[in-house]
Amino acid sequence: MLNKFFQPTEMASEDFFQRWKQLGAQVSFSPQQEVQKIFKAKHPMDTEVTKAKILGFGVALLDRVDPNPANFVGAGVIHTKNVQVGCLLRLEPNTQAQMYRLTLRTSRDSVSQRLCDLLSEQF
């Protein structure tokens, strides 16, 4: 249901990292703006299926942003009646261990943990 409110946001690598750093600087004031979760894969780890799940959530996948081509990087904006929340994500698969590390940074601390919980259930 959240995907109805999510707008994919395309951006260049430099823009992504600039925004990532800006949100990281805000983390010192509000630590919940960044959430990281390491979890066991619940489904077979397939690159194309993972891409489809991220896109289906409403996040734009950004190619060639991460130095590791196996990682997924995405951006989007959640639109509600009263507020817009910028969201950046990085999903790092470890196929040998059958695990993922998901890192989310959002412009609203109340959104980061909930979004992380919702996304991690998909993989």
Image (cartoon, rainbow, N blue to C red):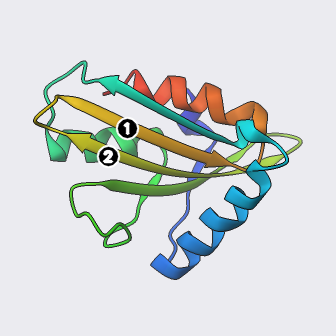
Residue at image position (49%, 45%) is 58
Instruction: Compute the Cα span from label 2 to label 1.
Output: 5 Å
x and y percentages locating residue 30 in the rendered image: 81, 42
Q: Which residue is mark 2?
A: 92
Marks 2 and 1 close (CB-CB < 8 Å): yes
In percent of the image, x 30 and y 28: which residue is there?
A: 123
User: Residue reaching furthest front?
Assistant: 28
Query: Residue 1 appears at what percent x and percent y?
Result: 55, 26
Looking at the picture, does residue 59 appear above or below residue 50? below
Q: Is residue 95 left or right of residue 17?
A: left
| Depicted 99 relative to depicted 14: above or below | above
Dot 1 corresponds to which residue? 101
Question: Residue 11: x, y in percent?
Answer: 52, 74
* x and y, in percent, of residue 5 in the image: 64, 40
Q: Earlier in the sequence, mark 2 or mark 1?
A: 2
When asked about the image quadrant of residue 35, the answer is top right
Q: Amino acid at mark 2?
A: Glu
Apparent side of residue 118 relative to residue 39 in the rendered image (left or right): right
Amino acid type at image mark 1: Arg
Q: Secondary structure at mark 1?
A: strand
Q: Residue at x 17, y 28 (%)?
A: 98
Report helix, strand or loop for mark 2: strand
Residue 95: quadrant of the picture = top left
